[in-house]
């Protein structure tokens, strides 16, 4: 079959390439190094999951469950599979299935993974997107709620970012919410005709989601709604107090927000979101989810975590003109003068690559001028040039593209000389 027009990528997705890809790789490496410094272990879960991982834990009235999951058409063994819409439930599934409860607790895990949501594509929101997630599983200590926030905060500070705030709230425990929801519904009952249609549905199905409404017309009702902090039991009150105490010790900037509830039903006690002044959208958030393991068939496992949207983080970094350090390895280009000298150049290319020296080339071109033109465009510092005379003498020309000077280097000393020049 021959198509008349070029097939386009799916709506709400993007191609990552060239400068954007370089930026992403550098950011990903920074995230990995930072997570490892705080003793988190990398985990990767499948893109496909049994739908019950999410339907049993996120809440049947959440947007993700009602209208945003990508289902795989085929059933296997009677089970329905979906593309993973979020990371935490998958991590807990992996924790239970792989017997991580027998590991020293708490287990600290991090991931950089793709998530999929069938939502309306818009600025900073994609149907396929990356998340950096942190999970601490197996401890009820509030110090770990603060530690999740600390890891994100210290990452921002590495780039000297200052215009952000952690908004924090407590959802309490099940008993706290039962009393709170009774009064919340009583408060909203008198305003039912005035709130948006979505909130009218939330009132009946999941009234806590009323506080998650983003419609401007409903803001005044949220502002005057009962404050859940006033309904906390002694244990939950002490928990959030200790979290805030730890944040004060760490000198992390935060503000209490009584309307903050997060989007999934598995959260309890501490919840938080991260806002930058440049955006009215949270770039990340998280909280405690002590009951999630039970929803997925395991035992009670107190846990806490958080995640940041990579695309939104990139947007913030670019607004602040954040650049990553130049990779010193990207400074070598190898060129050959004729088709007959290509074999010799290929051997040198292989030798350099096997010694972890990244080398650019264009072996499809046989004119030296066209190869040097590309080397200039790439901005490389040094160019290795191979001609017939160099083959006979077992040497190579090392040309400094910035100083416009060149030296003859013995093939036996080329690795040592290149590393010395690049200060590797």
Image: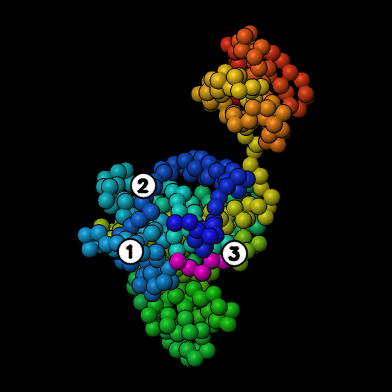
Q: In the image, which residues are magenta?
A: 118-122
Q: Earlier in the sequence, mark 1 or mark 3?
A: 1
Image position of 233 with respect to 371: above or below: below
Q: Which residue is mark 3?
A: 123
Q: Is residue 39 left or right of residue 275?
A: left
Pick the quarter of the image with the N terminus.
Answer: bottom left
Residue 73, numbered circle: 1
Q: Nearer the viewer, mark 2 or mark 3?
A: 3
Point out residue 185 in the picture as x, y percentages from the top left corner: 42, 84
Q: Is residue 119 left or right of residue 65?
A: right
Q: Earlier in the sequence, mark 2 or mark 3?
A: 2
| Residue shown at the point (72%, 28%) measured from the top left | 369
Determine the residue located farthest toward the top in the rendered image: 393
| Residue shown at the point (21%, 60%) measured from the top left | 77
Q: Which residue is mark 2?
A: 107
| Residue shown at the point (45%, 66%) measured from the top left | 118
Cα distance in 3D space between marks 2 and 3: 35 Å
Frontmost residue, 412 versus 364: 364
Q: Is residue 143 visible?
A: no
């Amino acid at each position: 079959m021959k198509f008349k027009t070029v097939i386009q990528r799916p709506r709400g997705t993007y191609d990552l390439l060239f400068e954007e890809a370089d930026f992403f790789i550098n950011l990903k490496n920074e995230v990995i190094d930072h997570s490892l410094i705080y003793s988190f272990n990398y985990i990767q879960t499948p893109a496909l999951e049994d739908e019950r991982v999410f339907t049993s834990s996120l809440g049947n009235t959440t947007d993700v469950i009602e209208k945003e999951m990508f289902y795989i058409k085929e059933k296997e063994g009677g089970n329905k599979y979906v593309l993973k819409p979020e990371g935490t439930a998958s991590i807990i599934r992996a924790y239970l299935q792989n017997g991580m409860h027998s590991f020293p607790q708490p287990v600290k895990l991090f991931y950089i993974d793709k998530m999929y949501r069938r939502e309306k594509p818009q600025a900073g929101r994609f149907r396929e997107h990356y998340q950096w997630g942190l999970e601490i599983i197996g401890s009820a200590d509030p110090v770990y709620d603060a530690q999740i926030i600390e890891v994100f905060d210290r990452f921002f500070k590495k780039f000297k970012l200052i215009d952000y705030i952690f908004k924090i709230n407590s959802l309490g425990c099940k008993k706290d919410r039962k009393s709170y929801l009774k009064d919340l519904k009583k408060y909203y009952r008198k305003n039912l005709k005035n709130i948006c249609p979505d909130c009218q549905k939330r009132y009946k199905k999941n009234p806590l989601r009323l506080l998650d409404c983003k419609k401007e017309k409903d803001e005044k009702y949220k502002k005057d709604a009962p404050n859940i902090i006033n309904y906390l039991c002694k244990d939950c009150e002490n928990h959030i107090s200790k979290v805030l105490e730890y944040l004060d010790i760490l000198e992390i900037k935060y503000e209490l927000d009584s309307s903050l509830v997060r989007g999934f039903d598995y959260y309890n006690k501490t919840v938080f979101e991260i806002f930058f002044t440049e955006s009215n959208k949270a770039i990340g958030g998280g909280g405690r989810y002590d009951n999630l393991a039970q929803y997925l068939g395991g035992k009670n496992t107190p846990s806490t975590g958080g995640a940041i949207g990579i695309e939104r983080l990139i947007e913030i970094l670019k607004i602040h003109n954040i650049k990553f350090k130049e990779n010193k390895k990207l400074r070598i280009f190898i060129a050959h003068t004729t088709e007959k000298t290509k074999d010799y150049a290929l051997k040198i290319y292989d030798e350099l690559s096997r010694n972890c020296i990244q080398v650019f080339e264009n072996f499809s071109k046989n004119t030296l001028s066209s190869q040097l033109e590309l080397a200039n465009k790439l901005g490389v510092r040094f160019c290795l040039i191979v001609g017939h005379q160099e083959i006979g003498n077992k040497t190579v020309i090392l040309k400094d593209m910035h100083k416009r000077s060149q030296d003859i280097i013995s093939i036996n000393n080329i690795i040592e000389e290149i590393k010395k020049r690049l200060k590797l």
